[in-house]
Amino acid sequence: MTAPFGAGGKVSIPGSKSISNRALLLAALASGTTRLSNVLRSDDTSVMLNALKTLGIGIEPVGEVLEVKGGGGDFPNKVASLFLGNAGTAVRTLVPVLSVLGGQYEISGVPRMHERPIGDLVDALRQIKCNIDYVGSEGFPPLRLNQSDVSIPQEIVISGSISSQFLSGLLLALPLAGAKATIRVVGELVSKPYVALTLRLMKDFGVTVKNENFETFEIAAGQKYISPGCYDIEADASSASYFLAAAVLGRGLVRIENLSESSIQGDIAFIEVLAQLGVKFSSGETWLDVDGRSVEKIKSFDLDLNHIPDAAMTLAVMALFADGPCKLRNIENWRVKETDRLRAMATELRKFGAQVNEGKDFLEVNSPEFIYDGIAVETYDDHRMAMCFALASFAGVSVEILDPQCVNKTFPNFFDSLKRITRAPVVSIDGPSGVGKGTVATMLAERLGFHYLDSGALYRVLAFVSNELGFELHGWDSEKIETWFLGQKVEFQAGKIFWESKDISEAIRSQKISDSASRIASNLEIRKSLINIQKSFRRAPGLVAEGRDMGSVVFPDSAVKIFLTASLKVRAERRYKQLISKGFKVKMEGLAEELENRDLRDKSRDHSPLRRANGAVEVDTSTLTVEAVLDTVVGLCESSLPAV
């Protein structure tokens, strides 16, 4: 991955893995047919889908919807061998459900799954007389589930200290026994929001559970799962965290189009953590905006992140950019995920130059003075390692993600989606004075949601800023000018120009600044420095740049190149009206000659002459309205830019 052009734009996130797999299982167990929309299509959900089909459940795609014909509280096939890959949710929910329903089943997975503990869940199931054998090592898959005569005791005790999925699986399974059941959790329950998510989905499918402070849970007898008919699955809040972080690290505005702060998922709390770090966000019913434009540096933090274990990994990589030491606490359950994430995260962060202290249940990260370039990140077959470390490229460095296909576990098109908010296609609009470049470019940028650059105004801005600060630029070389000016905050917004958040749109039009700008423009070193200064305005989600050499010199790789022209007479009339509207006293006579002479100078100068760029589409605006020109240009953009 190469360094991105900041971040900005809109992105849609695939359905939640946690909700998808729970909803698939509940739909399979319910009475009636359930139509599930926005189901995540990934390796993990494929594992659950294949397992349910093997167990005899009918599942058919109907357009974008999955239609699940429920088994009415049981599975037709009572003997099966299920390979569940490295899908922890599938293993830890199917094992208790199959154990309670009864049958003869073999449960296995990839080698890493056989290293992930399941003893606490098996111990709880044996309390209700489930007959379960360890095929390999005690306390770990693979498992053999034998026909059992389930009997519910007065109380079932389960440990909550390793994984909340053990409790979630038990909760999902017990209503199938038909009897009253009480669960008591011993030890500190980790990842409580995921248990709350399980309870919410159970309620949506007709079963209510009395929750006493996440310590005891009571399930009344005689409850059955009933299809809600249609069920829409939220976008994955854990996956959204990478794009929310990208907005901060890329100092842009990013909208998640199918998620809101009212999400039922625990990892939506990631936005509250960002707010503590000074990040602004807003939300509607179906969208979430994060604005990282005002974030100069990530604030150091010391946080208990047990409630958002997956999104916490995103924060670990953000710590590379922090202004001081960062500590992520109470994350011991990282060690029993797809890999030992504490060990893996510490190892990979050190590659980028960070000093890292790895504790039993915490990570301390001291950001490096410089983030190293060209690092190859080992993913350990862990999708979240790949997605998190893609964010390191915001340091302006290239990053190689080894085995990038591992993201297929939960987010197959992750890298394409990230590219969508970090790319910055350029639309260059060139042409002589009086052809309507500024008006059309401003309107186009607003239409596309792109940034805008008035390259001609930059000379005036440069003159104004140097005058305000008392600098004499003549005698400076181009590198020195470039370094100095790039340290100034200059923005073009809604037809206005801002310097350090101050509107200088009118101030740069004074005669004094005009004269200074003319002198500056004749300085070859200053003109050379302006090339890279202009390039610095290229930021995601894109840029509309207007001038005389945008497509030919500054942005020769523009995705769309437009060259506007008009007759000399029309240009003179437009220039006259423009100057009059701004309060200048001018005469119509001589304007055409002045424009003609200016064209000649611009075309004959040695550095960045006015000419139509290779591949540019010429549009004669002489007889067209502004709206007609805009429609023409928008049409060209729609045929050349993705997702316009």
Image: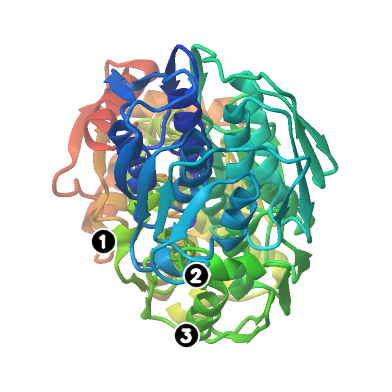
Q: For mark 2, give the secondary structure.
A: loop
**Mark seen at residue 251:** none
Q: Viewer-proximal residue, 58 or 204?
A: 58
- Name the residue rendered at 39%, 72% in the picture: 380
Q: For mark 3, give the secondary structure.
A: helix
**Mark seen at residue 138:** 2
The residue under label 3 is which amino acid type? Lys
**Can residue 27 be seen at all in this image of the molecule?**
yes
Q: Residue furthest left?
A: 614
Q: CA distance from mark 3 to mark 2?
A: 36 Å
Which label sits in the foreground, 1 or 3? 3
- Name the residue rendered at 48%, 69% in the picture: 392
Crowd around label 3: few <14 · some 14–19 · many ≥20 (10 Å): some
Crowd around label 1: few <14 · some 14–19 · many ≥20 (10 Å): few
First in residue order: circle 1 vs circle 2 = 2
Residue bearing mark 3: 351
Q: CA distance from mark 1 to mark 2?
A: 81 Å
Q: For mark 1, give the secondary structure.
A: loop
Residue bearing mark 1: 605
